[in-house]
Image (cartoon, grey):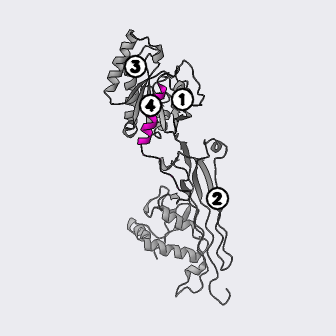
Amino acid sequence: VPRGGPDGSDGGKGGDIIILAERGMRTLYEFKMKRKFLADSGTHAVSNKHGKNAKDIIVKVPVGTVIIDTVLNEQLADLNMHGMKFVICQGGRGGRGNLHYVSSVRQVPNFAEKGAPGDTVIAQLEMKLLADVGLIGLPNAGKSTFLGTVSAAKPKIADYPFTTITPNLGVVSIADKTFVLADMPGLIEGAKDGHGLGIQFLRHIERTKVLVHVVDVIPVDESDPFENFKIVEKEIKEYSEEVWARPRLIALNKIDMITPGSEQAEALEVLRAKIAEYGYPIHTVSAAANLGMQPLLFEIAKTLEAEEAVESMPTLMPAMVKPDIDEGWDVREAEEGGWEVFGRRVLRMVKMTELRNPDAVRFLHRRLERMGIIERLRELGAEEGDDVFVGEAVFAFRDH
């Protein structure tokens, strides 16, 4: 203000980008159509009036979505309950007006701070299926037939391996209980190493509370059913001890193809005895003929009841945010000569400085000196006039 003090207030904050787990969402398909989300900047201050904050952007994803930072290759969040929020990008705070830079020796500061840069994240969204019970087993064990028999689901069924290439879901109703059953793609040996559809399968069963291992008692390829059983169990255990330790029921399937008193019937009893050593409840069933299914479903429902109920998520809950900005910094020789200063906090300070204003640059110099960066440059041998790179900005070193 002419013949008066400073008259600059703060700018508005940029909008956040918030990812929200929404029960109504089913797939991540829409993200193939729209891949970029950009929040607005806050508005500038007008005289001593604070600038207006920008609106946040809410991005809805299905419950069960995992967010991965593709640059850092690390998981940022696991939104496994309805209503969970994650602030993936925080809008930069508004720059401080010159009201903040008044001091005993600077009565009328002629510079202000630029707004902080907002976050930029390149993320991968991965959805892990949410189901109460997962059907596991080798290809062609009869899992899809099982699902189609006990629910209204219509999975694709054929007499060749890997009929199921994506998990199918069905809702099962037994007495007054209901639960969601997932028919998972079949495992093969080496699944944990990516063979077949293994890794996709194994990621999906992480969400289930109970597993039903469907074993084909008369495999088409005449393989040993017990060895097949061990292959699946081994792959799950090597992938995740925690998943392997979940409650398990065994369904010995296709008993309608066995004649009582035959050699196959004797082999079935031997198989049952061998699997019984693992301590799992065993049921002999025929999914195709709907034999023995009701007792199995009752036991599945009973096992689910015994498991811890899913916590209900309140409608309003605080959003998760990424850790605070890293305060660390470092200095090293630049390849093109001169010196390079690293550190997110330092980069942010430079970006928020009006570099064409000498007073603002002097203020930045004093802040860098208080942080110890100028002293560190002296120790490393920086000389008057050396180039100092901080992000995209280049400074000439001055030792005063």
Residue named by callout 4: 212
Are the two marked residues, 1 and 2, in contact with CB atoms closer than 8 angstroms? no
The earlier-in-sequence mark between 3 and 1 is 1
Asked whether residue 73 is drawn in magenta, I would say no
Residue 248: which quarter of the image? top left
The earlier-in-sequence mark between 3 and 2 is 2
Give the residue drawn at x 59%, y 25%. 156
Tag of residue 225: 3
Using the image, determine if residue 298 lies above or below residue 159: below
Residue named by callout 2: 39
Tag of residue 301: none
Using the image, determine if residue 162 lies above or below residue 108: above
State the residue lying farthest toward the front: 175
Residue 373: which quarter of the image? bottom left
Q: Front-most of 347 and 162?
A: 162
Q: Nearer the viewer, mark 1 or mark 4?
A: 1
Q: Residues within 10 Å of mark 2 (few under 14, many from 20)?
A: some
Using the image, determine if residue 351 lies above or below residue 245: below
